[in-house]
Image (tube, rainbow, N blue to C red):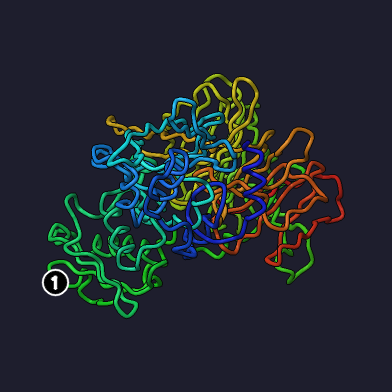
Amino acid sequence: MRTKLLAAALACAVLLTGCATVPTKGPIRSGSQEGLTPVRGGLGIEAQHPKVDAKPLPLVNGFLEAMSDSRAFDVAREYMTPDAAAAWKPESKISVYDQSSSQAVSQRTDGKVQLSAPLIGTIDERGSWTPAKPGQQVNFTFVLAKTSGQFRVANVPAGVFLGSNQLEPRLAPRALYFFNPAKTMLVPDPIYVPNSLPAGQSATQLIQELLKGPTSRLRSGAISIAPDGTTLAVSVPVDSGVATVALSDAAAALSESDRRLLAAQIVWTLRLITNRVRITVSGASLLPDSDVLSFSDFGSYDPSGQDGRLKDLYGVQKGKIQRIRGQDGAEDIGTTPLDNSVLYGSFAQSFAVNLRGDTGAIVTTAKDGRSVISSGSLDSEKKPADVQSTRTEGKVLRPSYDNENNLWYIDRADSAAPRLRMRTPDGKVTDVRANFGGASPLTLRMAPDGVRALLVMRSKAGATFVQTATVGTNVAKQVVLSQFRSLELPLTDITDASWNQLGILVAGKSAKGQPGRPWQVNVDGSQPRLIPGVSTQFDAIKLASNPSVDTLPVVQDSTGQLHWQGKDLNWVNMNDGDKGTPIDPVYPG
């Protein structure tokens, strides 16, 4: 059944931008700058009143259609007995099921009506998406009773049941924006809202959710600048393209610098509704020197990073670090040894580049035979003493940088106790508490914000899977990796994963015997699909990408050859005259 769902998703896949999105069908996607494009709104089945003398099965089908229309829950309640209608809480949860089977809703011999279908995922009362585990089902028995001579539903569903064909017309993906602990970069927190709401109602709902703080997925790592108790004084009108956000007096206590940060949260959250926002506290502007704010006023907090070096491609070939040139077509394709770097003289097992493209880190071997991580400048000649080295233990995965120049790495990766560590720019190393549940980490990629981690894992049984997790602190002020969430992808033999402008890239197989391919998936695990323009001329083993909108996806195939995809979706193959010598591709991050 999930194979059929995947095929349907691929058939209707289109590229739209956005934060993490709703599964299986429709344009709910991750997008450039962690944002979203507006979704076509308001289409779908309009709630219809119950028909007179409706039999149980048609009545339940009508109820399911009516409950999918969030504008008309009162109409859906007409299908219920008075007691059931009063007790029903449709806002508590949405269970998204595969409606493609003709037997999803069936009449039982006892007169009851049964809903039995594969569960695709759930959306909680905040709007957060959780993918279903393989084999999960929606099973609900509708009990019918007569009210004034008409059949009505007498028991209370747990929230709303939504057929997957109603996701696109009913729900719009939106991101709330919070800050990393350093307050230097926004962190997107995806939720879903009805797409049929007028601009003012949609803006009101988004800001109300923003002021509640991060959802459970990010609560341990991301922070909101809004003081506790901050609310909307009134709803948010959108007049002549300007949204006016009137905050309660609680926000008046903020410092000038924090007021600007809160403004960034609000403007980024509303940017798909309008690019012009007025924010007030007690009738006065939140920022005294600014009346109407624009999205461009807060570009420095872009969660994908701002440095133009993010699109520069690097690699490791024969243990030597390289710059890979020619992606933009302005020069011949080839490699340039980074022989001016203090790292060039060491044999690199793997390579990471910081987001500014001026510092690198390699996993190498010290004179005593132990593995170390060495970091230093990439762009100028310096003395070996300028190399900063940290001893490691056991197998070491390729490190990853965040926007604060912190270097994250996992050593002991081949042991029963893998160790996650974070090294600050001044060389201080912190152990990050992480329970990998007995699985072995194969890949670690940190998001630029330093709050979100992406991992490829291998279970004790040998299966590979992808997880996201959140970096935060516990009550003892220890740094902790928690909120592990498996993406539940219908892929096998997963070999790599990386953040990109549309969410996450994954290299894996959709069926046994098939070659590995690059797949696009939303950050919540929804809507896996082959990337547009995918080639059948090579397989995919390793991936290189980052969240920058200008970064081109790069694939290393099983022969070690590189391929990158241009903005026209055509693929360019790299052959620098050393065919057969693998090049491990690396983008900053």
Q: Give the percent coordinates (x, y) of residue 547.
A: 54, 56
Identify residue type, mark 1: Gly
Position of 399 relative to 310 (above/below) = above
Name which residue lies at 78% across and 62% down: 333
- Depth check, front residue: 342 or 508: 508
Q: Residues within 10 Å of mark 1 (few under 14, many from 20)?
A: few
Q: Give the percent coordinates (x, y) of residue 53.
A: 39, 45
Q: Give the percent coordinates (x, y) of residue 506.
A: 63, 44
Query: Which corner quadrant of the image does residue 99 belong to?
Result: top right
Query: Which corner quadrant of the image does residue 428 belong to?
Result: top left
SS at circle 1: loop
- Depth check, front residue: 576 or 247: 247
- Depth check, front residue: 358 or 509: 509
Residue 431 in view: no
- Depth check, front residue: 536 or 365: 536
Q: Which residue is mark 1?
A: 283
Drawn side of residue 450 relative to residue 333, left or right: left
